[in-house]
Image (cartoon, grey):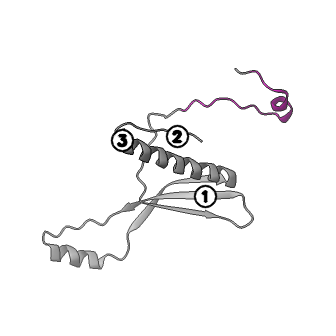
Amino acid sequence: MPKLTPEEISQGFAKLPLRYVFPEDSKVLFSHVATIHSQPDSDVVILSFFHVEEPVLTGSEEQERIEELEKVEYVTAKCTCRIALTTEQSVKVAQLIINHLKTREKRKEEGKDNEGTRSNA
């Protein structure tokens, strides 16, 4: 364990390294839609991610499928995850995503697009 600084002791917290753990039962879900909202006078931003359940069309001919699709009133988007972040965390996450995408694009240009990338905030 790293030695605590006087500031950390007086403030009652310490900056410790993170050890990332991905439990075997954790899921990776694809999100088709994402929303963001916050309440007035709140420092919390809520990100919601949704998976769209596409309608199943059973007609064998294109015209049959078109007719089936015309009867569909809506498509369900099920929320798969909601994340609450402070405004400060939101800025860090936004910057993390931007930096990650820039790094990924640069690696593509260098012909290294088959290598994974990882970024931390």
Residue 28 shows in this picture: no
**Residue contact at pointers 3 and 2, CB within 8 angstroms:** no
- The overriding secondary structure of the stretch rendered in magenta is loop
Residue type of the residue flagged with mark 1: Ile
* Viewer-nearest residue: 11 or 80: 11
Q: Residue at x 50, y 45 (%)?
A: 100
Q: Position of residue 73 (x, y in %)?
A: 36, 77
Residue highlighted by disc 2: 119
Q: Can you say whether 72 is above or below 15 in the image?
A: below
Badge 1 marks a residue whose secondary structure is strand
**Residue 5 among those drawn in magenta:** yes
Q: Nearer the viewer, mark 1 or mark 3?
A: 3
Question: Would you identify the image quadrant in which residue 14 lies?
Answer: top right
The disc placed on residue 46 is: 1
Count of numbered tags: 3
Residue 61 shows in this picture: yes
Residue highlighted by disc 3: 113
Q: Nearer the viewer, mark 2 or mark 1?
A: 2
The disc placed on residue 12 is: none
* Viewer-nearest residue: 56 or 109: 109
Magenta-drawn segment: 3-20
* Viewer-nearest residue: 28 or 120: 120
Q: Residue at x 69, y 51 (%)?
A: 88
Q: Position of residue 74 (x, y in %)?
A: 38, 73
Other residues around mark 3 within 10 Å, as few (<14) / some (14–19) / many (≥20): few
Badge 3 marks a residue whose secondary structure is loop
Residue type of the residue flagged with mark 3: Asp
Q: Can you say whether 74 is above or below 35 in the image?
A: below
Mark-to-mark CA distance, 2 and 1 = 21 Å
Q: Can you say whether 91 is above or below 62 in the image?
A: above
**Residue 11 among those drawn in magenta:** yes
